[in-house]
Image (cartoon, grey):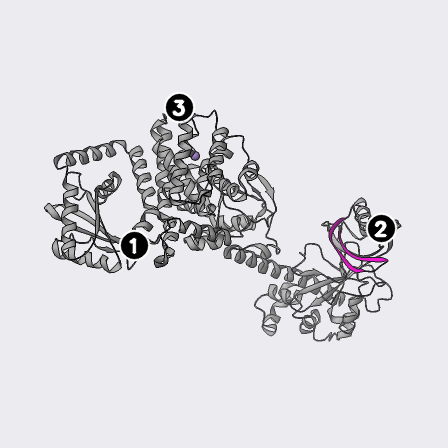
Amino acid sequence: MLQEKDLAEELIARVRAYDPVVEEGVLSRAFVYAKTAHATQQRANGEPYFLHPVAVANILAGLRLDSASIITALLHDTVEDTAVTLEDIEKQFGKEISKLVDGVTKLTRLELQSERSKQSENFRKLVLAMSEDIRVLLVKLADRLHNMRTLHYIEDPAKRRRIARETMDIYVPLAERIGIQSVKDELQDLAFSALYPDAYQSIVNRLQYLKAQNPNLVSDIVGELTNILAKQGLDAVITGREKSPYSIWRKMQRANVTFEQLSDIMAFRVLVPDLAGCYQALGILHSTYPLIPGRFKDYISTPKSNDYRSLHTGLIGPFQQRIEVQIRTQEMHEIAEKGVAAHWQYKQGAQTDGRQYRWLRELLEILEASTPEEFLEHTRLEMFQEQVFCFTPKGDIIPMPKGSTPVDFAYNIHSDIGDRCTGARVNGRLVQLRTVLNNGDQVEIITSRSSTPSPSWEEFVVTGRAKACVRRFIRMQQRSQYAELGKTMLTKMFRAHSQTLTDKALEPLLPKFKRPTVEDLYAAVGEGLMTTREVLNALYPDLAVEKQQAVDAIPEIKARAKLRKPSRYAIPIRGLIPGMAINFAKCCHPLKGDLIVGIITTGKGVTIHTQECDNLNNFQNQPERWLEVAWEDETTESNVGRLSVMINNVMGGMGHVCTMIAKAGGNIANLKITNRTQDFFELMVDIEVRDAQHMLDVIAALRSHPVVVSVERYGSLNEPVRAAVH
Ligand code: MN
């Protein structure tokens, strides 16, 4: 059809006007592609849907954006609304375009979020943060602008209002944030007319009436202002207009005046050649006309956060009219109108060679050469890039630092929720608590009353609040674990010397040991800061238990000629959380069912070794540090044991090892080749098993395979000790 061909040519001509080297072939291919994809769809007004993406592309061409943005505009609704997939787009138009279309699609989906969240400032930040590439946001703004221009075709008034409110709450501030005045003004007026049709209409009527009264007023004022500045030798270009209905309405509300009372409805813009000209023009106007007090603003010396620079003032101007005047240079004006898009245009400054599209090349260079983070730095959006915004199931938005996890999210809501969280669903799917959250994720925290924070959380949480809460909990927990351990140790020591331990009996000792409470005394013993013998001797000086006696009294494993089963004096390690009062030695990886022994480490509680561990030799001369410990049947959690495996260097040998371990019900947690020769591989394999017996089964299974030369548990007596003392 001829008409469509015209549309394509018109768009291409527009782009070519500012970018003579544009690849027209790709543009027209995108045009045809979008047209085919939307083939049968229609908009609310009955027009072919395809006219919408074309209109959006034209808006962006008006902002002189690069061809990738224009192509993205043409394709922006295909993934969400048609059978086209991102993969299709990548195949047809490459990675850059597919990434941009993906970004716009994500923003479109975000619009389906709850009304409640959209009213928050955080929602706008989320939209900004999700627009990792500023062009995504520009396409989305143009999309919204065209939808607002055609809003009146939507029949349902509630829907119209909802879209208009959303535009006012989200897209107007965003357009302002990135400094695109022209888009912001139009969105604002369109939203205003949809939200308050009566107010809008009466303001428009009044403006028309005033205009009819004095049709040439604006141009007459422009003429006089131009003359006055010219007389002083200042070459200025002045334009005038009625203010927008929305800004008049805002002023009426702020000043609490009726429209009849409101007199300054005209605004004039004075464009001067350079910075000095701005202040010169201001001086001339201020000395010619009476000022309206309180209206002068110097946004040149103090620019707005979106880089807006201009002088504003209010005057009783020509013909006794109250007017608003904005004075700026051409460069300031471009930045005010086009925001980020204009920055590149002027970065070249004086050395510009007059080619209008130069800034586009620079924009592309920045985009290509830099990560999104670097790019955002240029556009001053980086503050939102550091954050990630997630939704609660109710739709509230929680802002957090980048890298946050469900645990951070939980603590952000309430410390109780953090303390009791056991799992999380992100976008409906169960995930690990250490999963890093993304912008727009909906997070549901699963809690259980009996659950408590895990020391491992400290490694991955990023918010200060979560870190502090986990640490505080660990400190408390650790202290109570130390106290529990210390009390058990003392009870056994006392019993071995036919004494009974009571809290009350210990109280007189507190000043001597400088511990505020009995609990603190227990904790000090459990932590290894004091010995049980010290306490016993202090309470019963007559016993005068000697170092060696103490050791003999508690059956410990000094000779180690024979492995010992735990006696009735053994300290049960159930209920003691690994990583707190007790630690499992990294040299021998004790498993439940192994014969074990504890070594008290000052300030660290007890380290559990297997009785076979060669590192125990290092403690032979410190009998006081030995502690008899025992597993308890209720200890059910699986443990990780370490094997040293030697296999023949044959094809597929490693595969056999893995298969045998899996068949025996073991789960490989880690595998490392420690040595490799012509004939043999030596492997170090960490395997999750139920207990020591289970590990024996795994070992037996491995030994049964011809490829396996030898299998030993690490740290056993037959094995050279490789790991350092824990
Ligand atoms: Mn659209």
Image disc number at residue 702 = 2
Q: Secondary structure at mark 3?
A: loop
* 371 vs 607: above or below: above
| Quadrant observed for ligand 1 in the rendered image | top left
Pointers 2 and 3 in contact (CB under 8 A)?
no
Query: Of residues 472 and 106, which is closer to you in this image?
Result: 106
Q: Is residue 581 left or right of residue 389?
A: right
Q: Which residue is mark 1?
A: 309
In three-dimensional space, the C-alpha distance between marks 2 and 3, rounded to whole angstroms, equals: 73 Å
**First to last magenta residue range:** 664-687
Residue 368 x %, y %? 50, 51
Mark 1 neighbour class, 10 Å CA radius: few under 14, some 14 to 19, many 20 or more: many
Q: CA distance from mark 1 to mark 2?
A: 76 Å
669 is within the stretch colored magenta: yes
Q: Quadrant of the C terminus?
A: bottom right
Kind of element beneath mark 1: loop
Question: Camera-side residue: 458 or 324?
Answer: 324
Quarter of the view holding residue 231: bottom left
Residue with the mark numbered 3: 46
Spatial CA distance of label 3 from label 1 is: 43 Å
- Which of discs 1 and 2 lies nearer the camera? The answer is 1
Point 47% across, 35% down: residue: 28
Label 3 or label 1, whichever comes before in sequence order: 3
